[in-house]
Every structure is written in C-alpha cells, then in structure tokens.
Image (spheres, rainbow, N blue to C red):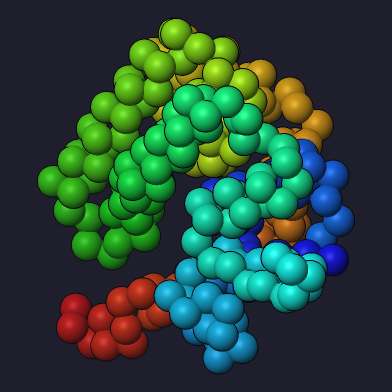
C-alpha cells in the first residue's frame, strides 16, 4: 500500500485527489508542517528538501520499493503506474506536462507567496502583497483563456487539472471566480467529482486540530528562525 507523507496543503491535496480518483488504497502519514515535522530525520530520508508531499510505494518499478518527493513528479509517477489521468495521445500528453509545469513554476509559487506575505509575514510589505496578488490574477487570466478553448487543461480530465484545482481552491475563497467565467465552469466541474471531494477533505480534521492548538508562532519560528522576535 502506498504511503502518503503529507499535510492538507494544496500540494498535499494534489496527491490525495489523484489517489482517490484512481481508487488506489493508501496510508496517510501526517507530516504536521505547522509543528516543523518536515525537518524530522526520518522524513528527510524520503524528502531531502524538507517539503511535503512525499510517497513511499513498496511495489515500485520492478517490484522494488521506491520513494518520491515533489508533487509534480509524484503525479506523473502515479499516472504512469495506474495508466490513468494522463493522455495517451503524445500531443495531449505533452500539453498535460506543459500545463503541469505551468502550475509548478507559476501558480503554486505565486499563490504561495501571496498567501505568505498577506497572511503570515509579521511585517506587512504592501509592495510584496500587491506584486503577488497581481501576478496571481495574471495567471488566472492565462488559465481562463486556455479554458475558453478546451474543457480541461489537457483536453481531457487529468493530473494537471487536479494540480491546478488544488491551488485555485484558495483563490476562489479569497477573491471568487466571477471575473474568470471559464475557470469557474472548470472549477465547479471538478468540485462536483466525488474523488476530488474526498481528496480535498483528506486530513482536514487534523489540520483544524493543529490550528486550534495555536501553532502559528512555531510555524513562524520554523520559517524565520527563533531570533525574529528578538530583532523586532
């Protein structure tokens, strides 16, 4: 059984959605990033960049165990392992990978930076907030134009839709999708899928328990260092 080492962030949810959509049994191994669990030595053995998610598959290529980190690589691996949610047609396949890289290099980092500067940074730098907010909006426009041409980002529903949708959930809650009608049509179609619903709900209870425990200061310490408060 595949082990999913993750936390219910957008990158973690990408993988839980894929596993649910494929009907692949998996074991959840919570990595509570709010408490710095991503720096535990055991986790670093499978994710040397101390980022979630990571997976361990005891039945990897050739029947041998394999561990993988980086959510995009994990999605491609699971798609190839199961033969699901990646186009068979070569052109569509490269379109899928193209838009997956778009998410990895654009949507994830830019949306993440906006969330960081707007919600976590102790020093509110308006320039940074505006910069990443505007870039997030620009990327939404790119997606909207693409989705005016196709039903899903690679033509058919695939890993690239799961990857982008996991990140757009936060945008939809923050700003709504009224200005991007094509994205909204696509977003609602994925939201109606039972596999996406189950994947999105994965470990949400654990995250809320962690949030209620008051770990925000610990999260800041993990990312900024314990001396931040001394500098203020």
**Residue 91 relative to residue 12: left or right:** left
User: What residue is rendered at 36% in x and 26% in y?
Assistant: 140
Looking at the rendered image, the quarter that the N terminus falls into is: bottom right
Residue 116 at x, y percent in the picture: 35, 55
Residue at position x 32%, y 83% from top? 225
Answer above or below: position of 184 versus 193. above
The single residue placed furthest to the bottom in the displayed view is 41
Tell me which corner region of the image, top left, top right, bottom left or bottom right, holds residue 209.
bottom right
Q: Residue furthest left?
A: 127
Residue 13, horizontal then vertical, whole percent: 63, 50
Residues 40 and 96: in front is 96
Quarter placement of the C terminus? bottom left
Quadrant of res 189: top right
Q: Nearer the viewer, residue 219 or 190?
A: 190
Q: Is residue 159 above or below residue 190?
A: below
Q: Is residue 206 left or right of residue 185?
A: right
Can you say whether 67 is above or below 174 in the image? below
Q: Which residue is found at the position 25% from the left and 42% from the top? A: 132
In depth, the one of 117 and 101 nearer the eye is 101
* Residue 145 location (% of width, % of height): 36, 14
Task: Reply above or below: 15 against 123.
Answer: above
* Residue at 56 percent of width and 85 percent of height: 45
Give x and y (percent) for residue 194.
Answer: 80, 31
């Amino acid at each position: 059984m595949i082990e999913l080492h993750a936390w219910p962030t957008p990158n973690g949810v990408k993988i839980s959605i894929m596993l649910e959509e494929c009907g692949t049994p998996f074991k959840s191994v919570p990595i509570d990033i709010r408490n710095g669990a991503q720096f535990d030595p055991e986790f670093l053995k499978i994710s040397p960049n101390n980022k979630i998610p990571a997976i361990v598959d005891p039945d990897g290529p050739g029947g041998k165990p394999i561990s993988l980190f980086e959510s995009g690589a994990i999605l491609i691996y699971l798609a190839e392992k199961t033969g699901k949610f990646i186009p068979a047609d070569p052109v569509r396949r490269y379109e899928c990978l193209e838009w997956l890289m778009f998410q990895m290099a654009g949507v994830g980092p830019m949306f993440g930076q906006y969330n960081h500067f707007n919600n976590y940074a102790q020093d509110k730098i308006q320039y940074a907030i505006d910069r990443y907010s505007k870039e997030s909006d620009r990327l939404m426009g790119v997606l909207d134009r693409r989705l005016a041409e196709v039903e899903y980002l690679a033509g058919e529903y695939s890993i690239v839709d799961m990857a982008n949708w996991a990140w757009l959930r936060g945008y939809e809650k923050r700003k709504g999708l009224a200005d991007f009608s094509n994205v909204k049509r696509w977003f609602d179609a994925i939201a109606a899928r039972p596999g996406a619903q189950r994947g999105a709900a994965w470990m949400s209870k654990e995250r809320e328990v962690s949030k209620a425990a008051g770990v925000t200061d610990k999260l800041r310490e993990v990312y900024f260092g314990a001396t931040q408060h001394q500098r203020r």
